[in-house]
Image (tube, grey):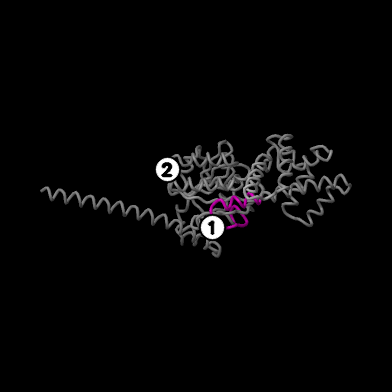
Amino acid sequence: MLWDKSANASSSAASSWDADQKSRNYRIAFASFEALRDTLLYHFAKTSDNMESVKQAVGLGGAGGPRLAWIGLGNMGRGMVKNLAEKGQFTSPISIYNRTTSRAEKLASSLPAGKAQVVTSIPEAVQQADIIFTCVGDDAAIEETISTALQNPTAAKGKLFVDCSTVHPDTTNKLAQTINAAGASFVACPVFGAPAMADSGNLVCVLAGPPDEVARVKPFCKGVMGRAEIDYSGQPQGAATRLKIVGNTFILAMVETLSEGHVLAEKSGLGTDNLHTFIETMFPGPYTAYSNRLRTGDYYNREEPLFNAKLARKDAGHARDLAENCGAKMRGLEVADQHLKEVIAHSGDRGDIAGIYGAVRKESGMEFEN
């Protein structure tokens, strides 16, 4: 009898182990299927004229598809969510969260019915999604956001976090370690473009991280939130934000050059309208857009800045840190940063990167406002 009981116990334990092992295998297989499904959707969508047949082929018909959440609805985030809701291929409403709930409610009400739902906490957003996008103002904000998101390890495990914020690459790599340690995945996806480009879906998305996870994010980038992608698949996530920081020094240099040019044109008698005509002809695109902001007074008379001068200084600080760590000199960056400091002193929280023009005007004996 004792032997029989022992044998039955061993048999029961073995059966329990087999059941647990099967359960684990099923979970692994399902996760692999999801990654494969999203990758196939991305590649098939490039060549197929019938999106519905593609969705059926990769298992996105009916109630399937990744559930999305978005955390952070600043000038960039609002436009990116709008395009996800209008163009993204998914069937569940996007769960959107913002510290100021009224901003999330206003955005949700402006989107097509059933495309977005407001959640009132970060853990709730994580709980209801498979892929969680974040887009916040600075390093401290993203670290706090991710810390809050990972408070419930069970809810975060197996999820994919995608950060679109502009932060120091060291911060990005630290986030990758923290998120991976929690059993989740991470892709960095900073973007280039002004709020108007976010609204029109014309951003340039920079992706870095594990290739399989980057492939899951791509269906929401080119043709949805952006017009193009820069793909750093297989590289550390910090490679994407390193490019973003270096790239933003080009924007600072552009605004500085335009500001000095406009001041010289006005003081020398050429006139800013004549200069703008030249810029339109020779440098269509961002140069023309910023030139127009300068000559029309948009650099100082907006209630909410398009590119907050304090955030621009944050980016400049990250660039200076990168330069100092590798022994590079960036004299132009130093000049632009000093002018940003003067913009903030003059305009406070309303200071815009384009306000560099006002700082250059004052430096040249003119009024800040044109």
Q: Position of residue 367 (x, y in %)?
A: 82, 37
Residue at the far bottom in the pictured view: 47
170 or 347, which lies in front? 170
Coordinates of residue 111 in the picture (x, y in percent): 58, 45
**Label 1 SS:** strand
Instruction: Name the one closer to the observer, 67 or 157.
Output: 157
The part of the chain drawn in magenta is: 223-247
Vertical order, 276 against 71 (above or below): below
Q: Which mark is residue 58?
A: none
Residue behind mark 1: 233
Q: Which amino acid, mark 1?
A: Ser
Percent x, y for residue 287? 74, 52
Marker count (numbered): 2
> Which kind of residue does numbered mark 2 sit on?
Pro
Q: Is residue 105 above or below residue 176?
A: above
Q: Is residue 232 magenta?
A: yes
Q: Quadrant of the C terminus?
A: top right
Quadrant in which residue 104 is drawn:
top right
Tell me the crowding category of disc 1: few under 14, some 14 to 19, or many 20 or more residues within 10 angstroms, Cα based: many
Is 52 situated left or right of 311 in this image? left
Element type at mark 2:
helix
Q: Is residue 370 visible?
A: no
Sequence order check, earlier mark of 1 and 2: 2
> In which quarter of the view is residue 307 placed?
top right
* Direction left: furthest residue: 1
Whether the magenta-drawn stretch holds residue 222 is answered as: no
Q: Which residue is mark 2?
A: 153
* Horizontal and vertical percent position of residue 84: 56, 50
Q: Are there few (<14), some (14-19), or many (20+) residues within 10 Å of tag 2?
A: few
